[in-house]
Amino acid sequence: MSEILVVGAGAWGTALAIHCARQGHDVLLQARHPARIGRENPRLPGHLLPPNVRVVAAPPRGPAAMLVAVPTQHLRETLMTVGPIAPLLLCCKGLEHATGLLPMEVAAAALPGEPGAILTGPNFAHEIAAGLPAASVIAGGDAGLRAGFIDLLTGPGFRLYGNDDAIGCQLGGAAKNVIAVAAGAVTGAGLGENARAALVTRGLAEIARLAVALGGRTETVAGLSGLGDLVLTCTGPASRNFALGLGLGRGENLRALLPDDGPAVESVATAPAILRRAGDLDLPLIRAVADLLAGELSLPDAIARLLARPLRQE
């Protein structure tokens, strides 16, 4: 078996470390404060670290693979600090707020010439840690690298597919978080299942429009990294983005829903970054969520604005 480095000891990084250990690999879980993590990481309560997971402060030399599971807003700094020490698999979603770059584009800027791939799809950390059945996607332009990561990470309960449309896969994983805020707001406001179904469907259309405009493929958005991730994120409070929208729909204060010491809620940085990258592309739902999160639009006004749009053919 191989030695795998997982960079980032949040809930997702910890879940990936547990999954890799379950496949028999020796795993190093790099954390900023290793002493705060015992056999159970407070970021992922209820899931013990297996004996073949060791929490470290500094990366080793020569692991078989490096999985980077930090928020996209910290990805550039992390990669420049750790450096190109192993084949790189990004395990994050979103766009870099300052530049509008997707994770693989950030990696290309931080580590020029280093090949990489990205893991994305409908996966809640606590379910992966528990070994519940799941599927996901390894996306990237290097077929050999994709195949290598699929072989390395596939387990009895975790099925992985390859995809060469890295743009479409990354945009699906980023934009679904924004749509999830809208789905949560609809649910929190008590607007009914009809409204949520309509919103999720139209949200998928926006994600497809965005992906194609930026060089992705429509069929990618219909797969695990698009529709699959969207369905998961828009249907329950285990999604931080859905939970944020749920609170907003119930009339709670945005600042109270985003404590400074809490986990990152990707949609807050991703929504405006998508709009800047998309230019004049018609993205009414994503635009409404961005305005809502910026405090420039109330939920009733957002609903009214969306429903007042001109009628058109689907």
Image: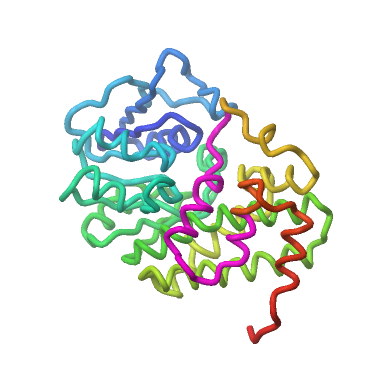
Residue 222 vertical placement versus 99 (above, below): below
Q: What residue is drawn where x is 75% and y is 53%?
A: 299
Judge from the rendering whether residue 190 lies leftward or rightward of residue 236; answer left or right.
Answer: right
Between 241 and 277, the one nearer to me in the picture: 277
Which image quarter is the C terminus in? bottom right
Q: Position of residue 199 (x, y in %)?
A: 68, 65
Within the image, what quadrant is residue 263 found in? top right
Q: Position of residue 162 (x, y in %)?
A: 35, 62
Q: What residue is drawn where x is 38% and y is 68%?
A: 214
- Residue 205 in the magenta stretch? The answer is no
Q: Position of residue 240 (x, y in %)?
A: 61, 42
Q: Residue furthest front?
A: 296
Q: Position of residue 235 (x, y in %)?
A: 68, 54
Q: What residue is drawn where x is 69% and y is 56%?
A: 183
Residue 245 vertical placement versus 33 (above, below): below
Q: What residue is drawn where x is 82% and y is 61%?
A: 192
In the image, the segment drawn in magenta is 262-289
